Image (cartoon, rainbow, N blue to C red):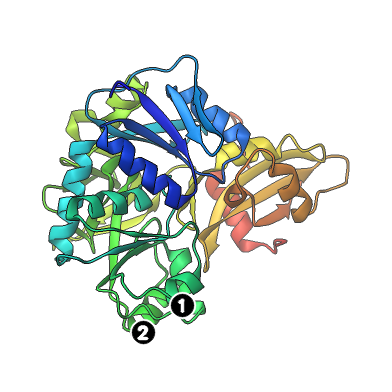
Amino acid sequence: MSNSRLVALRYPNRRMAARLTELWDDRLALLPLGPSLTGAEVGALLDELKPDLIEDESGITELPGGLPVEEGTALVIPTSGASGRPKGVELSHDALEWSARAYAARLGTRPGERWLSCLPLSHIGGLGILVRSRLAGTEPVIHDRFSPEAIAAERETTLISLVPTTLVRLLDAGVDLSGYSAVLIGGAGLPAATEDRARNEGIRLVHTYGLTETCGGCNFDGVPLDGAEFRVAGELIQVRGPMLMTGYRLKPDLTADALEGGWLHTADRGRIDPNGILEVFGRADDLIVTGGETVSAIEVESLIQTHPLVADAAVAGVDDYRWGQAVAALIVPRGGSVPTLRELKRFLSAGLADYKAPKRILIVHEIPRTNTGKIRRQAVRDLLESSEVSG
């Protein structure tokens, strides 16, 4: 196969890891798709990102309309945009290798240390572990799904990446993580109470900040990795360095806006303190980070609004101990009858992955909107956080 072709892969983690490694040896560009995605979600990604073929448990299927990638592209990773339409972040082999080397240098990893991967390999958090292990010549331990019992049974791994949700579940399950030389935490902010609890149990936490567009974490505990630079303009974080994406697949205008002047303009708010330490305050757009997964509020509310008992809806993320943020929805009923939370989740299951469905709903008479009809997202969030909600 030509190495300008883009191959979509849809497998559970272990099989995904094996095929990624095999196809990277051929310098192919790969589009990893999570097995939890619905058929409708996969179809939307294939239409948007135009791979040449898709490979899954049923075999290999050639796809019409496939378009080539730039030479040197290793990954195209889907990520949700504020518009609800998926974007494909293009990462080169060179950028991923830089990221892996910078991780090893900052963590001081020793020869033979092994990573445990319990994160989805359709996201940069899990994919980065494969790249770092490949560079170090070690075999990562891959779990098909997150399981506290399986992690507790591990004896040969010393490095692990988690999101706040999975850390909470491990702490609640009494899993001893004190033997790990580093427990990386990213994807969302970690509540102070959880941090204190982990530190008290002897866990060596490393806070990472980064995006899919930066090959994952490029700042540890507020300090940039070697080669990465940060600045804040108008309270929004900008970053540049050799780990930046090539661009958004088939979206040159969006790429030009995001990489203006060689700096990646993020939608994250923050500041750099007098000591040069980066503080991250949170997202400034309509995305919700729940359990390390990124959810578009627009995508979710658009589907909720198609329910026959829903006249209008708005979605936002609310603070949640377990998930970091929980997806929650305001619902205006149609004709007096309202769907229960369980009924709503069942309705959404055909078009949305489970993690995108609301965990809480609040029934209201109207949705807060501007004079031009745009949802006032902060007002929605304030209502959800200050009111009794079901679920």
Residue 266 can be seen, yes or no: no
Point out which mark residue 201 bears.
2
Q: Determine if residue 250 is in view.
A: yes
Looking at the rendered structure, the secondary structure element under dot 2 is: loop
**Residue corresponding to mark 1:** 171
Q: State which quarter of the image contains the N terminus.
A: top left
Q: Quadrant of residue 163 in the image?
A: bottom left
Residue at left offset 23%, top offset 64%:
221
Q: Toward which corner of the image does residue 282 lie, by quadrant?
A: bottom left
Q: In this view, does 339 lie to the left or right of 367?
A: right
- Relative to 114, does residue 130 appear above or below in the rendering? above
Residue 349: % across, % down: 69, 44
Say what amino acid the circle numbered 1 marks.
Answer: Leu
Tag 1–tag 2 contact (CB < 8 Å): yes
Residue at 48% across, 64% down: 165
> For this view, does 54 lie left or right of residue 384?
left
Is residue 102 positioned above or below 76 on the image? below
Residue most extreme to the top: 65
| Residue 92 % position (x, y) | 24, 34
Q: Position of residue 104 (x, y in %)?
A: 16, 59
- Residue 246 in the image: above or below residue 97: above
Identify the residue shown where x is 67% and y is 37%. 303
- Point out residue 166 in the picture as x, y percentages from the top left corner: 46, 66
**Near-viewer residue (330 or 146):** 146
In the displayed structure, does residue 251 sit left or right of residue 366? left
**Image check: 77 left or right of 222?**
right
Query: Along the polypeptide, which appears first: circle 1 or circle 2?
Result: 1
